[in-house]
């Protein structure tokens, strides 16, 4: 479903993808990693430009998403959600 990927940013070692069509505005990602994720005016997740955080915390935020709307990649390997 690569057509659904709206935002991709390289943050440290991770490539972070936010799939807005899966976002239900639960905001747990924002609560855990507010330097990385925000909700836009349509209540859809966005990745803050030049946002920085620890890799473990970015992963935790992705894992907190109830719909798997945040993917974490390292190179061409998807680390989250697990394949
Ligand atoms: S946790 Fe998931 S559903 Fe909730 S705002 Fe973040 S991306 Fe959207």
Image (cartoon, helix red, strand yellow):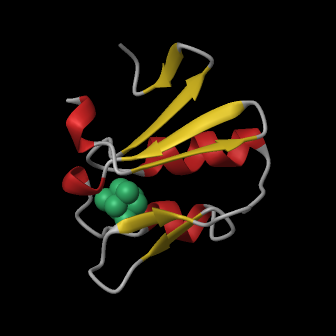
Q: Residue at x 40, y 69 (%)?
A: 27
Labels in figure, total: 0
Q: In this rendering, would 74 be left or right of 72?
A: right
Q: Residue most toward the bottom?
A: 41
Q: Residue at x 69, y 68 (%)?
A: 35
Quarter of image, res 20: bottom left
Q: Position of residue 61 (x, y in %)?
A: 54, 51
Q: Residue at x 55, y 70 (%)?
A: 31
Q: Position of residue 43 (x, y in %)?
A: 30, 78
Q: Quadrant for ligand 1?
A: bottom left
Q: Quadrant of the N terminus?
A: top left
Q: Position of residue 53 (x, y in %)?
A: 77, 54
Q: Quadrant of the C terminus?
A: top left
Asked if 64 appears above or below 28 in the picture, the reply is: above
Q: Residue at x 34, y 86 (%)?
A: 41
**Is residue 6 or residue 66 the one in the foreground?**
6
Asked if 12 appears above or below 39 in the picture, the reply is: above
Quarter of image, res 36: bottom right
Q: In this rendering, would 52 be left or right of 77?
A: right
Asked if 58 appears above or below 45 in the picture, the reply is: above
């Amino acid at each position: 479903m690569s057509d659904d990927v709206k935002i991709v940013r390289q943050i440290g070692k991770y490539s972070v993808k936010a799939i807005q069509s899966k976002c239900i505005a639960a905001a747990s990602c924002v609560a855990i990693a507010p330097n990385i994720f925000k909700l836009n005016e349509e209540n859809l997740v966005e990745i803050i430009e030049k946002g920085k955080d620890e890799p473990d915390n970015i992963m935790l935020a992705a894992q907190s998403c109830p719909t798997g709307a945040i993917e974490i990649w390292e190179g061409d390997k998807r680390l989250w959600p697990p394949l």
